[in-house]
Amino acid sequence: MKIVRIELKRVRLPLVRPFRTSSAYRTHIEHILVRSFDETGAEGWGEIATAVDPFYNAETTDTAWHIAHDFLAPLVLGKEFGTPDEFRALYGKVKGNRFARAGMEMAVWDLVGKVLGRSLADMLGGSRSQVEVGVSLGIEKEIEVLLDQVERYVNEGYRRVKLKIAPGWDIEPVRAVRERFPNVPLQVDANSAYRLTDAGHLAKLDEFGLLLIEQPLAEDDIVDHAELQKRVNTPVCLDESLHHADDVRKAIDLNACRVVNIKVSRVGGLCETLKIHDLCRSRGMPVWCGGMHEFGLGRAANLAVASLAGFTLPGDTSASDKYWKQDIIEPAITVTNGLADVPTGPGLGVNLEPDRIESHLVRSAALTTSGVSA
Ligand code: OSB
Ligand code: MG
């Protein structure tokens, strides 16, 4: 198989509700859709799920455009490959920039699945037809507003609640939620807002019976997290710090975490996701599937990933309507009683809505084996 044409489409969707974390405030999400064609005209789609700012990690939607357009596409166009692993080797010399690489690779998995008539979950080796999902709730101005949000999603059946925390918005909101909802499975995400010197403060979260505390310390750290884990009882979970399977191996060896968040984007794609899943399974490390406010395309990929046996904790893949008034796929992703169906159609198994993509389009480009065509 060869990729002979790649289209990039930057799409901007408004969030139904602004989302605040310790590091960013967002009202819109801008992701790049990758549409790849093989020599027979078959096509596959992927999603580059970057933020527009470098506040989660170093990549942005602009840098991902640059890497995909100026490096990844030229490296793969017209080159023969058999499997997604062989495809990613074509741009193996590109360092970092894993969100851009993940979106490129996703389009090829979709394409291969469509050609073979196999779903992504089937190709990955997934073993469930439905997955348990949770919800991720941003920082609010008032605790009452947060409590209303928790109530809404608990009533909708979500299997666990994740609260974003930051210095000044941590012990109090967590205590308030725990008092009102004594039995809800609860976890928190700090998006790297604390330092090791805050260990004593973070240990105050121990009394709330949290499932985990996600990425309390720096996004480029593993070592301090190991020290922190000795000083708090709540299991530490790493997100930002884990870029690939070797990072995960080191984190496990150092006891830097007791849970791993796997994000397809953050680790550079589905091939690396599988490697990390297999490693964690063999080491008895529980994993769950994180998210980056994906549109329906990336959301479908997350559900396929979460169908793998090692994903034993509910993920962040909420229904489309938690984020979008109108997703770019039809039907949208839905959640009933805290369960989402793993897509069964070929490839990612979703139907894109071209009109919706066009009406939210910010920028597009097309590249072929003979260069840039539009
Ligand atoms: O750290 O997990 C995170 C969203 C954007 C960027 C980073 C994160 C998140 C979330 C929400 O927590 C996950 C989702 O619902 O997509
Ligand atoms: Mg996180």
Image (tube, helix red, strand yellow):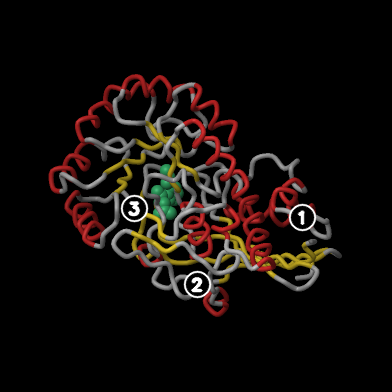
Residue identifier under label 1: 82
**Alpha-carbon neighbours of circle 1 within 10 Å: few (<14), some, or many (≥20)?**
few
Q: In which quarter of the image is the C terminus?
A: bottom right
Check contact, mark 1 vs mark 3: CB within 8 A.
no
Depth check: give the residue in front, 328 or 130.
130
Q: In this view, does 143 lie above or below 171?
A: below
**Can residue 63 be seen from the camera position used here?**
no
SS class, disc 3: loop
Q: In this view, does 154 lie to the left or right of 28?
A: left
Asked if disc 1 is less than 8 Å from ligand 1, the answer is no
Residue identifier under label 2: 329
Q: Earlier in the sequence, mark 2 or mark 1?
A: 1
In the rendering, at what x and y percent does residue 245 appear? 58, 35
Q: Residue 134 carries which label?
A: 3
Q: What residue type is labelled 2?
A: Ile
**Alpha-carbon neighbours of circle 3 within 10 Å: few (<14), some, or many (≥20)?**
many
Of marks 2 and 1, the one in the foreground: 1
The quadrant of the picture showing ligand 2 is top left
**Looking at the image, which residue is at 77% across and 62% down?**
3
Q: Quadrant of the N terminus?
A: bottom right
SS class, disc 1: loop
**Looking at the image, which residue is at 46% across and 39% down?**
239
